[in-house]
Image (cartoon, rainbow, N blue to C red):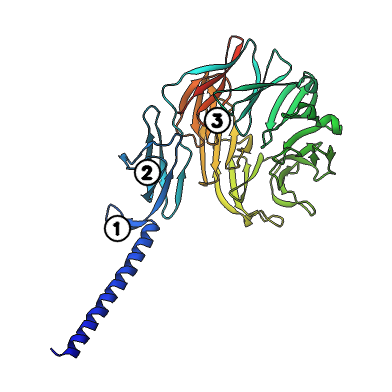
């Protein structure tokens, strides 16, 4: 074989080798890309796209079982799952278990960032004890403070529980401000430094802002403006701006300036709002979106005999509008409409007929959940998962223990569930509301017996 021929064969072999290598690299990149996108072989040997499951838990380090098989990693962790239903179970030594059947969808991320496991060996201790009933008990949105009052005192007490093991107490001299009026409702602002209080004395209702940092800076809004407010809501995190309803008229109140706006809209039955927008229902059964500087936008209108409720909020930079019409509920998401009767410009994310007619719809503090309620019946819409869960609780009132756990009191027991009704557990002996402190390790709650009442503390996590 001459030299030229050998050289040609070597060149051909080299070209073939390089071609095979290029094809292999390209094929590997394609395969890895598809694997990253969740594609793989299922148990039947067929190619399919999986979804990504992301699991977090409190506490971390929980053992993860998927479809009765333990995976190698503990929480917090991620796992590719074939599309379809899967049973997830979390367990940890010394704690109870958490389990749920979830739906994995091809190419989608499913976040389970709310599972909470509770210590099984727990004991409660008294933080404060009184020989009279606790009139009200209101934790701040930050879960760093509790404000409460006992029947034997005309002043309020503020507990700082930011350090659960070292609770400090401040007496708020509210007696002169409240003038022994009955407290009907309390609402904290998001900054946790002001409380909007609705009070009543005989047939007279007054609205008062209590300044937690300096009670002397509190303001009686009803007396300041000489108006009969039927409803007031904070419309800013710092509590300086509020939306008021008086005699069917919608107004803006600036607490720090002691100023009130001209009428924004009239003939109003109810409203909901965030910092930027107001959505209201007129007495003529129209649902409208308030627009400063231009005409309000009519979102929809209904028949007088229909029971209509509305809730509004913004979650993950998307606006959500929840409307119930008798038993039907509609959940819209996207950019708000810019012209009348254009609610269809938003995505109708979910529509369903409930088993009950809601008395009202509200949102949680983050506007992630939209809760329709009637008696002990709840329908909770999860904005992130676009899922509606309908279930009943044991009493006609509930409260959030943290961002995801809904609790109620039944026969002196605190019953706790995930927001969707799953993982029902009897948590502790309690007669009143409670919450999980900011450290996520401590539960505070009320317990009363024969005229004596206590604020209790219970360690729920190491």
Position of 221 relative to 11 (above/below): above
Residue 139 position by quadrant: top right
Q: Is residue 380 visible?
A: yes
Pointer 1 residue: 46
From this view, report whether residue 327 is shown above or below residue 291.
above
Q: Earlier in the sequence, mark 1 or mark 3?
A: 1
**260 to the left or right of 114:** right
- Mark 1–mark 3 CB contact (< 8 Å): no
Residue 5 is situated, as x and y percent measured from the top left of the image, at 18, 89
Mark 2 lies on a secondary structure that is strand
Q: How far apart in space, not on screen, are marks 3 and 2 (Cα)?
A: 27 Å
Kindly check if marks 3 and 2 are in contact, taking CB atoms under 8 A apart as contact: no
* Tag in front: 1 or 3: 3
The residue lying at 36 percent from left, 65 percent from top is: 30
The local crowd at label 1, few if under 14, some if 14 to 19, many if 20 or more residues have their Cα within 10 Å, is few
Categorize mark 3 by other alpha carbons within 10 Å: few (<14), some (14-19), many (20+).
Answer: many
The answer to which image quadrant residue 306 occupies is top right
- Across and down, in percent, residue 66 comes to 34, 41
Q: Which residue is mark 2?
A: 86
Residue 390 in picture, x, y percent from top left = 51, 37
Residue 285 visible, this angle: no
Q: Nearer the viewer, residue 380 or 262?
A: 262
User: Which residue in the protein does label 3 denote?
Assistant: 401
Earlier residue among tags 1 and 2:
1
């Amino acid at each position: 074989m001459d030299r030229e021929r050998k050289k040609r064969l070597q060149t051909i072999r080299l070209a073939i080798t390089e071609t095979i290598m290029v094809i292999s690299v390209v094929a590997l990149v394609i395969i890895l890309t598809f694997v990253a996108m969740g594609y793989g072989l299922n148990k039947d040997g067929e190619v399919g796209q999986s979804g990504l499951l992301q699991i977090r838990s409190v506490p971390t380090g929980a053992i993860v079982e998927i479809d009765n098989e333990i995976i190698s990693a503990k929480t917090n962790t991620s796992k590719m799952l074939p599309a379809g239903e899967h049973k997830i179970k979390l367990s940890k030594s010394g704690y109870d278990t958490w389990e749920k059947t979830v739906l994995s969808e091809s190419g989608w991320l499913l976040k389970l960032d709310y599972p909470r496991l509770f210590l099984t060996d727990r004991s409660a201790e008294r933080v404060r004890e009184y020989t009279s009933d606790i009139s009200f008990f209101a934790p701040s949105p930050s879960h760093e403070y509790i404000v409460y009052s006992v029947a034997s005192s005309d002043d309020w007490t503020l507990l700082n529980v930011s350090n659960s093991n070292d609770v400090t107490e401040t007496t708020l001299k509210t007696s002169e401000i409240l003038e022994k009026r009955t407290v009907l409702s309390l609402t904290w602002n998001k900054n946790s430094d002001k409380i909007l209080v609705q009070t009543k004395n005989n047939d007279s209702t007054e609205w008062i802002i209590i300044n937690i940092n300096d009670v002397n800076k509190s303001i009686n809004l009803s007396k300041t403006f000489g108006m009969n407010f039927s409803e007031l809501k904070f419309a800013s995190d710092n509590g300086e701006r509020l939306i008021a309803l008086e005699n069917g008229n919608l107004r803006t109140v600036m607490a720090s300036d002691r100023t009130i706006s001209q009428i924004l809209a009239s003939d109003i039955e109810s409203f909901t709002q965030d910092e930027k927008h107001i959505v209201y229902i007129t007495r003529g059964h129209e649902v409208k979106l308030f627009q400063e500087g231009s005409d309000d936008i009519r979102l929809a209108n209904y028949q007088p005999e229909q029971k209509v409720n509305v809730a509004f909020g913004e979650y993950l930079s998307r606006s959500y509008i929840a409307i119930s019409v008798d038993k039907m509920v509609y959940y819209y998401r996207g950019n708000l409409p810019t012209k009348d009767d254009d609610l269809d410009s938003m995505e109708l994310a979910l529509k369903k007929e409930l088993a009950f007619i809601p008395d009202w719809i509200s949102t949680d503090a983050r506007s992630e959940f939209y809760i329709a309620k009637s008696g002990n019946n709840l329908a909770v819409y999860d904005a992130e998962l676009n899922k509606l869960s309908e279930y009943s609780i044991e009493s006609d009132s509930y409260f959030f223990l943290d961002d995801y756990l809904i609790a109620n009191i039944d026969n002196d027991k605190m019953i706790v569930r995930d927001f969707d009704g799953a993982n029902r557990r009897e948590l502790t002996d309690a007669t009143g509301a409670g919450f999980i402190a900011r450290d996520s390790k401590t539960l505070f709650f009320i317990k009363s017996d024969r005229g004596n009442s206590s604020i209790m503390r219970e360690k729920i996590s190491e």
